[in-house]
């Protein structure tokens, strides 16, 4: 088996883990508060990455630390929004809205860093935005629409998408200047520190150490973050960036499928059309739009 084929298979496996964990986390949140859950799983992931990359971390310099902590700030906000939102919305919606970060990246690069945006990217974003409206805005509220009519969990998931878009960009820029190892460790460890600092301020933390909570922490901390970073770093050496982005699009599909099988979640016709439009918009933006601008994605969910 060629290394390219192995890279594709492993990255699909990683994406399946990311997609399926939405259901697992949703179940765990019945026994643990969102911010405490994030703090524990990120700490576990940070310890694992520290053990794997300890040789590279001994040589870390000030510039690497600063860039890594900037990424950590975006990861912190992204995960806090995502997990808090997941408690209030469905796994498939959370995954689909989080996936909007992919189409936000070229727009942020255009307005913030003056990067070129192709017509296909703009077209894809417009289609995805129509899908976003159908997925999140209740029917009959098109006139006199206000944000108060939307589910708070959906709004938090949108905030997550924005934060992850900035995280993608900052990781891409940091990886051009530094080795991957210190950035991978710092963004997770830094996010863990921020999460633990936030817990006593932002929520009344509680946890029941059920098997669901323990499994969710182990799977998301070790497989979904620590192992996923390592696999992704290796896999992207042997496959085009566009292929990577397209594989990542399977994440909401996997989330949707596992939610359907395990939780029997069904989207109504309006939400289903919105979900399809979001996926179509992201595909157009990444597959055709990437022909005119370089992809800068490195993402973990």
Image: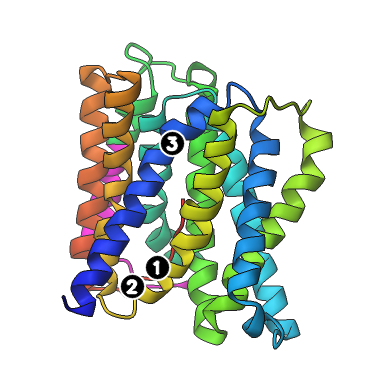
The disc, 2 or 3, on the residue closer to the chain's N-terminal end is: 3
Locate residue 98 relative to residue 285 in the image: left or right.
right
Residue visible at 68% across and 80% down in the picture: 57
Q: Determine if the magenta segment contains residue 47.
A: no
In three-dimensional space, the C-alpha distance between marks 1 and 3, rounded to whole angstroms, equals 19 Å
Q: Residues within 10 Å of mark 3 (few under 14, many from 20)?
A: many
Disc 2, SS: helix
Q: Are marks 2 and 3 in contact (CB under 8 Å)?
A: no
Mark 1, residue position: 232
Relative image position of residue 213 (x, y in whole percent)? 58, 32
In the rendered image of this protein, does residue 153 appear above or below residue 13? above
Q: Is residue 123 magenta?
A: yes
Q: Check residue 235 in the rendering and tell me which mark sits there, or answer none.
A: 2
The range drawn in magenta is: 113-130
Residue 284 in percent (x, y) is at 20, 55
C-beta proximity under 8 Å, tags 1 and 3: no
Q: Position of residue 53 (x, y in %)?
A: 60, 76
Residue indicated by mark 3: 22
Q: Quadrant of residue 287?
A: bottom left
- Mark 1 falls on what kind of element? helix
Residue drawn at the location 34% of the way across and 52% of the way down: 15
Residue 180 appears at what percent x and percent y? 53, 78
Drawn side of residue 59 relative to residue 129, left or right: right
Give the prevailing secondary structure in the magenta stretch.
helix
Which of the 4 image quarters holds residue 132?
A: top left
């Amino acid at each position: 088996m060629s290394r390219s084929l192995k890279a594709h298979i492993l990255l699909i496996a990683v994406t399946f883990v990311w997609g399926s964990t939405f259901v697992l986390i949703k179940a765990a949140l019945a026994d643990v508060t969102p911010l405490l859950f994030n703090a524990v799983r990120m700490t576990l992931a940070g310890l694992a990455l520290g053990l794997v990359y300890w040789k590279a971390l001994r040589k870390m310099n000030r510039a690497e630390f600063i860039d890594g902590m900037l990424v950590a700030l975006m990861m912190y906000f992204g995960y806090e929004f995502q997990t808090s939102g997941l408690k209030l919305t469905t796994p498939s919606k959370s995954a689909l809205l989080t996936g909007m970060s992919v189409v936000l990246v070229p727009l942020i690069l255009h307005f913030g860093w003056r990067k070129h945006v192709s017509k296909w990217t703009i077209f894809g974003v417009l289609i995805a935005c129509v899908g976003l409206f159908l997925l999140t805005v209740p029917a009959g509220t098109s006139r006199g629409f206000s944000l108060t009519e939307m589910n708070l969990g959906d709004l938090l998931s949108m905030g997550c998408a924005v934060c992850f878009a900035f995280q993608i960009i900052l990781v891409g820029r940091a990886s051009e200047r530094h080795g991957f190892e210190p950035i991978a460790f710092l963004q997770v460890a830094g996010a863990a520190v921020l999460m633990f600092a936030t817990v006593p301020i932002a929520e009344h933390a509680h946890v029941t150490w059920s098997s669901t909570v323990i499994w969710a922490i182990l799977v998301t901390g070790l497989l979904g973050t620590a192992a996923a970073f390592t696999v992704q770093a290796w896999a992207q050496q042997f496959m085009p960036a566009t292929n990577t982005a397209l594989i990542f699009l399977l994440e909401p599909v996997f989330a949707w499928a596992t939610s359907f099988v395990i939780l029997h979640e069904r989207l109504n016709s309006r939400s289903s059309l919105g979900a399809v439009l979001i996926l179509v918009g992201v595909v157009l933006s990444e597959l055709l739009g990437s022909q005119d601008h370089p992809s800068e994605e490195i993402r973990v969910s």
